[in-house]
């Protein structure tokens, strides 16, 4: 069976499994209910949350980014992991107590203002939108490779699939479906990594292989460490040393911060914590979630290095002289069809060469790294098919959640609560569907004309979240004094500053997007952190100048901060 | 009118000429008839009667059973229905085919005297009703004589006569059998009872009377005088 | 040998349902005591003597029963009956019986009739059914069956009021002039009191005061009131519970009429009320159990009389409430007064006032404070008695043990508040299951203020608590109406046996769930689904179209479920909530699908509104 047929088969089977589980849980739920309270064990909930969390960005692109930029790419890993901890442990318990289901609702109530809600809604839509655009790109890459079509066509197909999944699907948000999705993803991710690790270093665990010595052709240890080899290759080919960062420390810091605080402000992830019945469960499953995310995130650097070495060697050959194109491995041919690998035989020697200087004849899209790894390692076709299924699972679960946030925010928060208060519930539902359709189309546009590779686009989404929602939420919980004027001004300032900065460097004047032109040397990916600081500053200043918070709100905030249960327990 | 006046006088005379030997009950009965003579029938208590005999000749044949059922306030009262057998001389013979009373039924039966005493006691404050009353009354009178009593005039409402008059009034030709109990009942939309038994026939007669009275203008408007016949 | 037996009567009666089910000896007795009359067309009407009720058994002829206004109710021929309505309901017969065709009629005296009903269940049921059918015919013309008739139907249109600063003299003049036994006292058009004959006697004359006294000094302040849409029998209950004879009818705080006990007696018939009255009169458990055996028949009669399902639910629940109260009172006679104030709560269907056949009991206690060991023992004895007595009276023990006799549910107000707050804060599956039961709570006996405090706090916590509401919604949406992809019915199976459509769990319960979510999200105090919907509409908290559709769907499905159970009861099949679509006419099938579609759409709205999904 060829890869294509197998891909259809595996993707089909995994989808059948998701749907099957969805139907099964639905039918069994009433019964399960009566059996001693039922409930999902935290470990499974942890897997489900991890599936939600691992977007196409982390699955497809993160290894790519690390693989290509090396050390600098690890900021993403740090930022996202840190953000998750911040969110799970510091914010969620308080937000839950407030009893609001969405971030805009929280902000609207906490800042006793419809305008604050509206601003928050706009932020949420903006963020979700950017995020989903990144997902669409990822889905497009998956489809284009495995259906052997142009990446644009892949995006179109992905748009349809995501739309149907989100609008018609009954399998969203069902814990066991997500557990299955996690299993598919982690399996798809680990299998090639393990194979490569064994082949290249003799270690089963890629995490160990990452720091181990490479094997030579005969299978004996070559006493060359993987990372040394990579550093050597990189220097030789004109890249920055793999283990050395090329970015300024400040930029790394800012990107990490933006990702971290952005994570904590991401609307679709926060909602996930509210659907867990118990705060305690939310915390213990957060622990599991961290573990499950860690399994993947710790593999990423290893996988990235393996495939980097593999890729360079298969293009440049063992002697770094280049490999004739006619002898190029099959995966290069396959990926050339998608347009994501381009070979331009500048010196007309018929050989490919990959480097960071004028010798370079290759244009390799970073997003293909994870997906191409099994092929590079000559793994069986089913592993490749599994990879496709995993990529789809990652993209679908995340984008469905995001689409819901977008469409219900538009229909409920924007239309019903602001613009058209008199529409009926059915109309509202219709607008929600329309909004998710529109959301897909716009996301598709950005998927075809990406402002950057997947992880970078997603990073911008995080930056927007960090600069707009995170401060408003944090101050909403931890300060009784913050008033609506301050919060609104802060959100607007943070969001607009960040947006303008990003739009300028990514769209208006991409040529100027070099570190010399950046403000304080902070890249667009990290500017969200600066936006966040601006948000805080503006909010506090405006708050000082305007009327204080009403006493009701002060009491409300205090009641969130100090656990109510304690007072009641004394009566017992 | 003339008949009624004559009946009225006859009753008065009977009461006034209280002959010795006439059962006391009968005296009360006459008194009752007189008092209620001009009362609407609804106010009068009636006693539907049927007698089964061994044949149709009062001289030769004997009574074997008597069934009575009272009509009080215009309603038949099965509660007070009674049915008595009477001892006879000899056997019921072939007549058993008609009335269904067998010789063995008569083992514990009343004597003729006992039967008469019982019947007159029952009808002290009632007016007798029978279908083809003439026959029944003749048998009773014959029985009185046989038991050594004097015969007395007896009065009854005869459902057969009532229907006969009604039919004549309607100028209808009477066919043979058209005045039989069941034939009459059919005209009044009454169910047909097959059992030929003194009590059943008494009931059938009572029902027929109620039907007739209703057809003739109701129990409130018809007086006893209009109905009573002397025999 | 008894030879005075009337064979023709016996033969006829022997073949006649329900007399055919009697023992021969009893039947003979019947034949004896009846009287026979003949009715002819000339009389036109059968004269019915109200003082001497009897059963009319048509031996021959034809009759027609009609209302006073001349509307036909029933046609009766040979072997059928009339005159039983009066004996069953105890009310005077106002219907007329026309004689269509001459005939004989047997009269069975009321004494015998009652005796037969008491001794023979099938006999009793036969006539209850016939009565119900009669009522249905009647109600199809005019819906005024007592149990389901409303205050609006009987209240006078004219209202005489007096201001609080008028003198007693003026009031007395007005009362005698208008021949009234009470006056409503108003202040700025709003009700502030009531002045009755009794007040004049007890508070003025008996104290030797004069007519110059002001009305406000003699009146009863804040009298018990009733809403115009209340059922008549609810007014009766209110009066008897409070021992009062006047009830102001109040709408939007404005008095619009006054109902007196005389008004109620005038409109009386009311099997349910008779039953409740009987319950209140019983002095021991055995007789209560006996009385409660009539409940299925009551239900059946109500079903046959085509009463609205929601009203049947209210009627039945009132019976259960009275039974519970009576049992508590009986037990307290033995145990003495309670050591502290407490409140007996009803949950679930009794709480929602939509009890149906075989509903199990869900109840609990709120205690004023922590009980000592002795006090605990008191409540243990009280609750165990009441719960097991209810069980014997036909309200089975709750399988989930949500009962007052379970120490787990004898909680102080504080403990209840904690329990509820835990469910609200931690909406795990078992908490949500509790929510569907406990959040439909209603006080049945005891201190109302305990209940009020609990309810107010609970609703304050649920109101606008999006996370709890979302969890509740998520849970409610797990169960969907039994419609397939192409609007075909999805039938439930038990092995190979097709059980049909579960009208309760896949129908009414889903609507109850949906409406509960809305009600809790805005903090509505009502627990009855219909009342909740009405309150939601009033608050504009729900789309009016959706709400009206849900109302209709609820009533339609519940009604179908009841009539189905009525048929099952009639055919002596086990009573269940399952219905087979094949047994329905295509019109009803279509309507049922529409009703399920309404639920489906409402679930979609809930999902979107509270879960932010679609």
Image (cartoon, coloured by chain):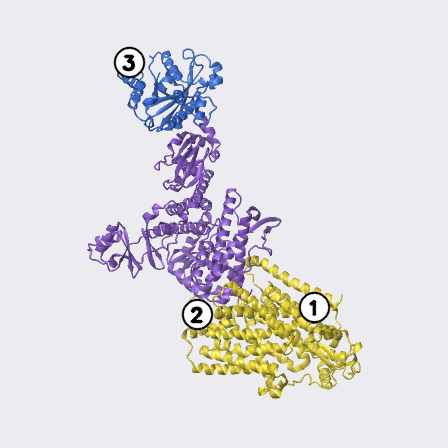
Mark 1, residue position: A386
Mark 2, residue position: A567
SS type, badge 3: loop
Q: Comparing marks 2 and 3, which lies closer to the viewer?
A: 3
SS type, badge 1: helix
Quadrant containing the C terminus of chain C in the rendered view: bottom right
| Residue C394, visible in the rendered structure | yes
Residue A505, horizontal then vertical, whole percent: 60, 83
Looking at the image, do the residues carrying marks 1 and 3 touch, with CB atoms under 8 Å apart? no
* Both labels 1 and 3 in a single chain: no
**Total numbered circles:** 3
Chain A: give its colour: yellow
Quadrant containing the N terminus of chain C in the rendered view: top left
Q: Residue at x 38, y 13 (%)?
A: B142
| Residue A189, visible in the rendered structure | no
Looking at the image, do the residues carrying marks 1 and 2 touch, with CB atoms under 8 Å apart? no
């Amino acid at each position: 069976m060829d890869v294509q047929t197998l891909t259809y088969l595996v993707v089909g089977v995994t989808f059948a499994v998701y749907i099957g589980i969805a139907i099964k849980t639905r039918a069994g739920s009433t019964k399960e209910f009566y059996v001693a309270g039922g409930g999902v064990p935290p470990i499974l909930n942890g897997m489900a949350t991890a599936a939600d969390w691992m977007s196409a960005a982390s699955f497809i692109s993160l290894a790519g980014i690390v693989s290509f930029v090396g050390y600098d790419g690890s900021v993403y890993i740090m930022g996202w992991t840190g953000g998750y901890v911040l969110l799970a442990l510091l914010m969620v318990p308080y937000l839950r107590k407030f009893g609001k289901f969405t971030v805009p609702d929280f902000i609207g109530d906490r800042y006793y203002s419809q305008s604050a809600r509206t601003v928050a809604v706009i932020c949420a839509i903006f963020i979700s939108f950017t995020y989903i655009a990144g997902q669409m790109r990822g889905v497009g890459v998956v489809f284009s490779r495995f259906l052997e079509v142009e990446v644009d066509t892949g995006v179109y197909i992905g748009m349809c699939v995501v739309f149907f999944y989100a609008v018609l699907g009954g399998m969203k948000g069902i814990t066991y479906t997500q557990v299955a999705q996690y299993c598919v993803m982690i399996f798809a991710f680990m299998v090639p990594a393990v194979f490569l690790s064994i082949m290249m270093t003799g270690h089963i665990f890629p995490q160990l292989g990452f720091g181990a010595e490479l094997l030579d052709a005969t299978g004996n240890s070559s006493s060359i460490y993987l990372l040394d080899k990579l550093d050597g290759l990189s220097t030789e080919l004109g890249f920055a040393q793999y283990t050395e960062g090329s970015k300024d420390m400040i930029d790394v810091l800012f990107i990490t911060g933006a990702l971290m605080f952005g994570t904590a402000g991401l609307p679709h992830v926060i909602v996930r914590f509210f659907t867990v019945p118990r705060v305690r469960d939310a915390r213990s499953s957060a622990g599991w979630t961290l573990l499950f995310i860690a399994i993947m995130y710790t593999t990423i650097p290893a996988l990235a290095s393996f495939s980097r070495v593999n890729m360079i060697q298969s293009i440049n050959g063992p002697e770094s002289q280049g490999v004739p194109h006619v002898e190029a491995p099959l995966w290069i041919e396959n990926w050339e069809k998608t347009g994501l690998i381009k070979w331009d035989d500048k010196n007309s020697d018929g050989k490919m060469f990959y480097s960071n200087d004028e010798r370079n004849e290759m244009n390799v899209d970073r997003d293909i790294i994870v997906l191409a790894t099994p092929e590079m390692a000559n793994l069986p076709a089913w592993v490749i098919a599994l990879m496709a299924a995993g990529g789809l699972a990652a993209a679908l679960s995340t984008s469905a959640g995001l689409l819901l946030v977008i469409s219900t925010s538009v229909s409920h928060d924007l239309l019903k609560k602001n613009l058209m208060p008199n529409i009926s519930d059915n109309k509202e539902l219709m607008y929600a569907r329309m909004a998710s359709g529109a959301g897909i189309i716009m996301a598709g546009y950005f998927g075809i004309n990406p402002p950057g590779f997947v992880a970078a686009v997603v990073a911008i989404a995080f930056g927007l979240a960090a600069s707009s929602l995170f401060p408003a939420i944090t101050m909403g919980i931890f300060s009784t004094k913050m008033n609506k004027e301050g919060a609104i001004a802060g959100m607007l300032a943070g969001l607009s500053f960040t947006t303008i900065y990003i739009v300028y460097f990514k769209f208006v004047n991409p040529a100027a997007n070099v570190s010399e032109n950046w403000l304080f040397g902070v890249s667009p990916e990290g500017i969200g952190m600066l936006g966040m600081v601006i948000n805080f500053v503006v909010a506090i200043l405006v708050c000082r100048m305007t009327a204080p918070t009403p006493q009701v709100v002060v009491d409300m905030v205090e009641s969130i901060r100090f656990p109510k249960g304690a007072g009641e327990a004394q009566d017992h | 009118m003339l008949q009624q006046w004559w009946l009225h006088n006859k009753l008065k005379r009977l009461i006034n000429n209280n002959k010795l030997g006439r059962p006391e009950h009968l005296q009360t009965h006459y008194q009752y008839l007189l008092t209620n003579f001009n009362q609407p029938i609804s106010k009068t208590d009636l006693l539907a009667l049927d007698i089964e005999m061994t044949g149709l000749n009062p001289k030769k044949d004997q009574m074997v059973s008597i069934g009575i059922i009272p009509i009080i306030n215009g309603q038949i009262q099965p509660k007070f229905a009674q049915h008595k057998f009477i001892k006879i001389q000899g056997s019921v013979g072939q007549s058993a085919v008609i009335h269904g009373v067998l010789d063995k039924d008569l083992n514990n039966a009343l004597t003729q005297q006992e039967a008469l005493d019982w019947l007159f006691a029952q009808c002290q404050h009632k007016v007798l009703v029978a279908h083809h009353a003439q026959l029944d009354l003749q048998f009773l009178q014959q029985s009185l004589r046989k038991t050594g009593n004097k015969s007395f005039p007896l009065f009854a409402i005869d459902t057969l006569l009532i229907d006969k008059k009604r039919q004549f009034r309607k100028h209808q030709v009477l066919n043979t059998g058209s005045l039989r109990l069941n034939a009459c009942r059919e005209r009044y939309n009454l169910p047909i009872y097959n059992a030929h038994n003194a009590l059943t026939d008494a009931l059938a007669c009572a029902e027929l009377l109620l039907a007739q009275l209703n057809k003739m203008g109701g129990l409130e408007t018809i007086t006893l005088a209009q109905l009573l016949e002397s025999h | 040998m008894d030879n005075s037996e009337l064979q023709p009567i016996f033969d006829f009666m022997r073949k006649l349902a329900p007399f055919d089910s009697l023992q021969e000896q009893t039947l003979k007795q019947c034949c004896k005591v009846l009287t026979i009359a003949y009715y002819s067309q000339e009389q036109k009407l059968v004269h019915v003597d109200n003082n001497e009720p009897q059963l009319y058994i048509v031996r021959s002829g034809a009759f027609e029963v009609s209302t006073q206004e001349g509307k036909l109710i029933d046609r009766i021929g040979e072997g059928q009956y009339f005159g039983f309505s009066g004996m069953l309901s105890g009310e005077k017969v106002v219907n007329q019986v026309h004689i269509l065709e001459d005939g004989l009629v047997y009269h069975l005296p009321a004494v015998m009739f009652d005796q037969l009903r008491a001794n023979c269940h099938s006999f009793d049921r036969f006539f209850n059914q016939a009565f119900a059918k009669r009522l249905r015919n009647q109600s199809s013309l005019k819906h005024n069956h007592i149990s389901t008739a409303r205050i609006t139907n009987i209240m006078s249109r004219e209202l005489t009021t007096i201001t609080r600063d008028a003198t007693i003299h003026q009031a007395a003049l007005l009362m005698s002039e208008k021949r009234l036994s009470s006056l409503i006292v108003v202040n700025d058009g709003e009700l502030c009191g009531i002045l009755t004959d009794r007040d004049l006697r007890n508070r003025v004359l008996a104290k030797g005061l004069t007519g110059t006294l002001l009305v406000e000094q003699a009146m009863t302040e804040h009298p018990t009131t009733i809403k115009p849409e209340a059922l008549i029998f609810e007014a009766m209950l209110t009066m008897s519970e409070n021992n009062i004879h006047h009830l102001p009818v109040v709408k939007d705080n404005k008095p619009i009429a006054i109902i007196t006990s005389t008004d109620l007696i005038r409109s009386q018939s009311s099997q349910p009320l008779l039953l409740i009255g009987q319950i209140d009169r019983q002095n021991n458990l055995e007789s209560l159990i006996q009385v409660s055996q009539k409940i299925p028949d009551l239900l059946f009669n109500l079903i046959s009389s085509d009463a609205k399902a929601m009203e049947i639910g209210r009627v039945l629940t009132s019976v259960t409430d009275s039974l519970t109260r009576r049992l508590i009172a009986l037990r307290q006679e033995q145990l003495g007064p309670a050591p502290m104030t407490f409140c007996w709560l009803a949950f679930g269907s009794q709480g929602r006032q939509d009890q149906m056949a075989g509903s199990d009991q869900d109840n609990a206690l709120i205690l004023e404070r922590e009980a000592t060991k002795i006090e605990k023992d008191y409540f243990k004895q009280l609750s165990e008695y009441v719960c097991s007595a209810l069980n014997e009276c036909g309200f089975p023990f709750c399988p989930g043990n949500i009962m007052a006799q379970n120490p787990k549910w004898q909680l102080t107000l504080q403990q209840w508040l904690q329990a509820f707050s835990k469910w609200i804060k931690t909406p795990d599956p078992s908490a949500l299951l509790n929510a569907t039961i406990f959040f439909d709570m209603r006080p049945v006996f005891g201190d109302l203020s305990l209940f009020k405090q609990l309810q107010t706090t609970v609703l304050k916590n649920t109101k606008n608590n999006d996370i709890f509401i979302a969890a509740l919604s998520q849970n409610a949406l797990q169960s969907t109406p039994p419609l397939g992809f192409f609007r075909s019915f999805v039938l439930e199976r038990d092995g190979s046996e097709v059980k049909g459509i579960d009208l309760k769990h896949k129908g009414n319960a889903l609507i109850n769930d949906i409406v509960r979510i809305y009600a809790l999200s805005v903090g509505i105090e009502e627990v009855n689904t219909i009342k909740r919907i009405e309150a939601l509409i009033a608050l504009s908290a729900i789309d009016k179209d959706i709400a009206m559709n849900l109302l209709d769907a609820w009533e339609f499905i519940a009604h179908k479920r009841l009539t189905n159970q009525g048929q099952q009861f009639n055919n002596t099949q086990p009573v269940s909530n399952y219905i087979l679509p094949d047994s329905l006419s295509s019109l009803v099938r279509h309507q049922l699908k529409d009703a399920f579609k309404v639920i489906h759409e409402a679930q979609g709205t809930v999902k979107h509104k509270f879960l932010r999904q679609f």
